[in-house]
Structure formats: C-alpha cells, structure tokens
Image (cartoon, grey):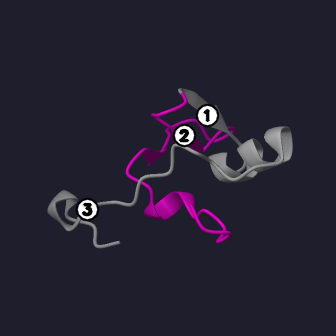
Amino acid sequence: MSNERVVCRKCRFYYITWDSRQPHGCKAMGFKSRRPPSLVVRKNTGHECLRYTPKDEADGNPP
C-alpha cells in the first residue's frame, strides 16, 4: 500500500451506525467508534489500516 491516508468513506467495510455516540463502523474489524476507524487504527498501531478495500463501482458507489 502507498503512503496515502486511508479514507474510510471510500472503503467497502465502512458503515454509518445508528449509535449517535459511535457513528462510524468497520465491518472488517468489527468495531464502532466516535472517530473514523482508520484514525483509531493509526493512533493505536502507528500504521495505516491494512484491511482497507476500495468500494467497487458494482456496489453502487464509485471509488
């Protein structure tokens, strides 16, 4: 992966939750948080998210 920052909204595993206290979710890692999951991963590991997978156009959301 390149040195670019991961943008969760462009990842196929990202979702918006119904929980107003933890509105960001990651299906690949199985957690919800107040901040976008990529920021949580970077803060805790020092690395960009390794599960990032760009959305496909077939998903209805262009990358």
The residue tagged 1 is 32
Residue 2 included in the magenta stretch of the image:
yes
Name the residue rendered at 25%, 62% in the picture: 56
The answer to whether residue 36 is visible is no
The spot of residue 21 in percent (x, y) is 69, 38
Image quadrant holding the C terminus, namely bottom left
The spot of residue 41 in percent (x, y) is 72, 43
What kind of residue is marked 1? Lys
Check if mark 2's residue and mark 1's residue have beta carbons within 8 Å: yes
The residue tagged 3 is 56
**Is 55 displayed left or right of 53 in the figure?**
left
Q: CA distance from mark 3 to mark 1?
A: 23 Å
The answer to whether residue 5 is visible is yes
Q: Residues within 10 Å of mark 2 (few under 14, many from 20)?
A: many
What kind of residue is marked 2? Gly
What kind of residue is marked 3? Asp
Q: Quadrant of residue 10?
A: bottom left
The tag earlier along the polypeptide, 3 or 1, is 1
Q: Residues within 10 Å of mark 1 (few under 14, many from 20)?
A: many
Judged by its main secondary structure, the magenta piece is: loop
**In front of the other: label 3 or label 1?**
3
Q: Secondary structure at mark 1?
A: strand
Q: Secondary structure at mark 3?
A: loop
Part of the protein shown in magenta:
1-29
The residue tagged 2 is 25
Name the residue rendered at 75%, 49% in the picture: 47
Residue 25 included in the magenta stretch of the image:
yes
Q: CA distance from mark 2 to mark 1?
A: 4 Å
The tag earlier along the polypeptide, 3 or 2, is 2
